[in-house]
Image (cartoon, helix red, strand yellow):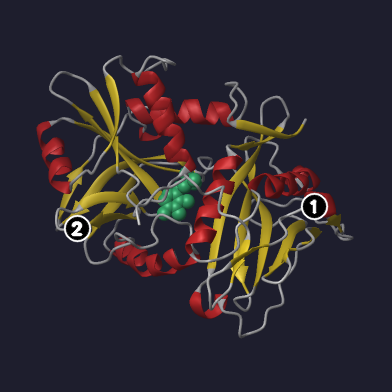
Amino acid sequence: MEYIYGENTTSFPNVAADPMTGELTSLLDINPSQLEIIRNERPATPPPPSSLTDHMLTIPWSSSAGWGQPKIVPYGPLALEPSVTVLHYAQTLFEGMKAYRDTNGKVTLFRPDMNMKRMNTSAARIALPTFDGEALLELIKALVRLDRHWIPQLPGYIGTQCALGVGPPNEALLFVICSPVGPYYATGFKPVSLYGTVEYVRAYPGGTGGYKLGANYAPGVVPQRAAAKHGYAQNLWLHGPEHHLTEVGTMNLFVVFRKGDGTLELATAPLDGMILPGVTRDSVISLAKDHASRRQVLDGLPEKFELVERPITMKEVQAAAENGSLVEMFGTGTAAIICPVNKIGYLGKDIIIPTGDGSAGLGPVSRVMLEQISGRQFGTIPSDWSVVVAE
Ligand SMILES: *Cc1c(COP(=O)(O)O)cnc(C)c1O
């Protein structure tokens, strides 16, 4: 099957497949008008980042009835049978996004439609039920509105975590929890070092690396520890005999090369099924393409500029670092937005990656991308990527 991310995902219906015949039956979808809210009688005072907020959203699913009543209830533990398959076979997926309080005091979400789409794509990959993304988004907005006083007053946000996991294979539970997260860079953010990992792989052709499935993440813990033991912050996931650069830890990866004629080439690996289709990745690509085509010129980027989705090899990066044509390298993801890289430990040697001397080591392209994306998240740059939850 050809790997197509983002296409025909909304058309996956919420259906039950007969295990014997494979015949599909349509089931009830998520219905926001049925929302019941049970308020937390003992709300907490928003403490410092990384605890959880007062409420959570739950929506049950069963193969006989489809999606049931959505409820916002006090945050608390789930009761599960020890036999639930999620604990044995990891039939679970997640999404992560943030709610921002922008500079005008509005509470917003950043491109949440992309998360809804990706969540459906992930669900379809492991035969969990799909759903109407707009309906779930409406419910997430209600949850964020209820707990919006948890968003830090300083530039900060609450992270919303959506997850879909199963009990027995004919039941599922979709839940959304929130926690305050401070500004990512507050603790002094600096470029990271990467360990070019050749002992382990994160993803492979035909596998599940392109989906946000729980099963993809536990196997990354031991390699992460190994990278730390070697003195590096993150794994640089390489693939195949040519050591293609795929992702960094749980971020997408961008490399900037200066070509012979002076053009800056911003390159990232293509969505070949091994790459998680990041919302931040897509945002960087879209901004870069608009600049390259002069549709929307970005201050600070040169005119000679191009964006390419293509395979990138370690040989190429090593050669570019040696001959001075490597400009910068950075990871992208919702948590940090942009994370510059300063070196790669590769087959026993360190490859030094140029970083900017200005704020936090951001290079010429990553600095502009961080400004552009965070400006849209915090409302200083108007954009339809920002979806208002509360005025
Ligand atoms: C979540 C994730 C990303 C980043 O995706 P965003 O939507 O930009 O947050 C990149 N790689 C992996 C493996 C991820 O799990």
- Give the quadrant of residue 43: bottom right
Residue in the picture at 34% in, 43% down: 253
Residue in the picture at 62% in, 39% down: 156
Query: Can residue 188 be seen by looking at this rendering?
Result: no
Q: Quadrant of the N terminus?
A: bottom left
Mark 1, Cα crowd under 10 Å, few <14 / some 14-19 / many 20+, is few
Considering only vertical position in the picture, is 270 above or below 1?
A: above
How far from the left and from the top, in percent, is residue 226? 31, 66
Q: Nearer the viewer, residue 9 or 92?
A: 9
How far from the left and from the top, in percent, is residue 322? 11, 37
Residue in the picture at 84% in, 54% down: 34
Question: What amino acid does circle 1 point to?
Answer: Thr
Mark 2, Cα crowd under 10 Å, few <14 / some 14-19 / many 20+, is few
Q: Secondary structure at mark 1?
A: loop
Label disc, if present, on residue 214 of the rendered structure = none
Q: Nearer the viewer, residue 99 or 292?
A: 292
Label disc, if present, on residue 45 of the rendered structure = 1
Question: What amino acid does circle 2 point to?
Answer: Gly
Q: CA distance from mark 2 to mark 1?
A: 50 Å
Q: Along the horizontal axis of the image, is 160 left or right of 200?
A: right
Q: Secondary structure at mark 2?
A: loop
Looking at the image, is mark 2 or mark 1 earlier in the sequence? 1
Query: Can residue 289 be seen by looking at this rendering?
Result: yes
> Of all residues shown, which one is farthest toward the bottom?
83
How far from the left and from the top, in percent, is residue 135? 71, 47
How far from the left and from the top, in percent, is residue 217? 44, 64
Q: Nearer the viewer, mark 2 or mark 1?
A: 2
Q: Which residue is mark 2?
A: 240
- Give the quadrant of residue 355: top left
Q: Along the horizontal axis of the image, is 10 left or right of 269?
A: right
